[in-house]
Image (spheres, rainbow, N blue to C red):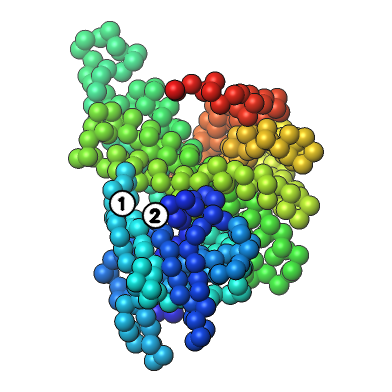
Amino acid sequence: FTGEWTGTMLLTEPEAGSDVGALTTTATPNPDGTYSITGNKIFISGGEHDLTPNIIHPVLARIEGAPAGTAGISLFVVPKIRVNDDGSLGEPNDVVCTGIEEKMGIHGNATCSIALGAKGGCRGTLLGEANKGMRAMFMMMNDARLMVGNQGLSCASPSYLYALNYARTRLQGRHLLKMMDKSAPAVPIIQHPDVRRMLMLMKVYVEGIRSLFYYLAHCSDSIATSTDAGEKARLQGIIDFLIPIAKGYVTERCFDVCSLGVQVYGGYGYIREYPVEQLLRDCRITAIYEGTNGIQAMDLLGRKLGQNQGRPIMDLFEAFRTTLAEARDVDRAAPLAEALEPAVIRLEEVARHMGTTALYGDLLTAAAHAHPFMEVCGDVVLGWQLLWRAKVAAEALAAGAKEKDIAFYEGQIRSAQFFNAVLLPVALGRMDAILSGCPIAVEMPEDAFGGK
C-alpha cells in the first residue's frame, strides 16, 4: 500500500439513490475474466481530478442474468486508467466525467457524474463473489459512516471555538444588570445570557460527541488487541449498534452546533468574510451522504435493535450501568448519575416498545418513530459520555488538580449538569411521544398534506 492513487465509491444512479437495488449499471463477462461495465453514476465524491495518476472506482453493477434487487448486485474494481500486468499505467478505461455538481458546500470536493463504458471500452474486475456486492460494500460503508460522523464533528468543533473566541472579543450592549445605566460600558457578548446559552449547547454537544468517537476508537483498538473471542464479539456488537447513532444523530447535532455558531456571530456570521457560514454549509451534507439519516434510523430499528437477539443493545446498557455505578462513588458526580439513570431505564422501555411494535404491531407506525428513536438513543449515549467525563473531572479535582487544569475540569462537570437540566427533559418528552404510538404521519391521506 503506497497511497499513490485515490479511490471512490460508485453506488448512486439517477433512479437508484437510497434504493440501491434499483440500479441499472450492467456487467457483461469477457473471455479474459474481466467484465464490460456499462452505466451512469452520480454524486461521486472525488470522481475526477488530476491530483493522482489514477483513480480506482469500486462500482456496484448487475451481471447479466443476476437476480433483481440487492440480491443480484456485484462489486467491481474499475480503474480510471487501465493497469498493465507489470503495474504500469496503460490506456484510459472509458470512465468519463460528464458533469461536476454546483453544491451548497464542500466546494473542495469535486462531486461528479460518471459515464462508464459509453464507448464500450470500460473493463472491471469482480471483487469478491458474484451477487455479494452489497455485503462487500458495507464492510467499507460502516467505516465510511463513522468517518462522516467525524466529519460532522470536524465542522462543529471549530464552529464552537470560532464562536467562543468571537463572543469573548465582540463588544455589544451593556450588561443586563446595568442596562439602565447609560454610563455603563459595552461588554463582550459572552456576558449576555442568551449567548452563553448557545455556547453551552455547542460545548455540550461537541464534548459529548468527541467522547463518543473516542469510545468507539477504544472499542476498535480493544478488538484488535484482545485474545478473548467473546469480548471481541461484545465490543463489535456495541460498535455496530452505535454506528447509525454516530452517523445519524451526531451529524444532526453537529449541524445544530454550526447553526448556533452563525447565530453567535449575528449578521457577520452570514457573511463569507467570516468562517462559520462555510462550516454550516459544509456540515449539511453529512446528514445526507453515506446513507441519509432516515436510512440510519431504519438501520437502527430494523437491523441493529434485534441483532444477535438484542445482545448488542443489552451490552450497551450494561456499559451505561457500569458508568452510573462508578459515578455514584464520586461526590460531585453522584447527583449527575442520579439524574441520568431514569432516562436509561426509560430508554430500555422505549427500545422494547419499538422492537415489539415493529415485529408484532404496526410496522409503518414503528418506522415513523424510527428517527425519534435514534434521537433519544443518541441523547442517552451523549448523557452517558458526559457523565463519564464529569466523573473523571470530579476525581481529578478531588485529588488536587493543577491550577491550570481546574477550569477545564470544572467545565466538564458543568456540561453534564447543563445536559441533565436542559436537554435530558426534552429527551424524556420524546420518549413519551414514541410510547404514545401516534400513527398520524402514516395514516393521514396524502392530499391532506396540501400543496396543490
The residue at the point 39 percent across, 56 percent down is 42
Instruction: Say what amino acid the circle numbered 2 marks.
Output: Phe
Q: Total label count? A: 2
- Label annotation for residue 289: none
Where is residue 239 drawn, in percent x and y? 63, 56
Of the 4 image quadrants, the one containing the N terminus is bottom left
Question: Which residue carries the number 2 mark?
Answer: 43
Residue at 49% in and 52% down: 16
- Horizontally, residue 418 falls left or right of residue 306, namely left
> What amino acid type is highlighted by mark number 1?
Glu
The residue sitting at the bottom extreme is 86
Distance from the alpha carbon under mark 2 to that under mark 1: 8 Å
Judge whether 151 appears above or below 279 on screen. Answer: below
Q: Residue furthest top?
A: 180
Q: Position of residue 423 (x, y in %)?
A: 55, 29
User: Dot 2: within a 10 Å radius of its alpha carbon, few (fewer than 14), some, or many (20 or more) residues?
Assistant: many
Question: Which residue is nearer to you in this view: 357 or 123?
Answer: 123
- On the image, numbered disc 1 is attached to which residue? 101
Q: Is residue 247 left or right of residue 48?
A: right
Callout 2–callout 1 Cβ contact below 8 Å: yes
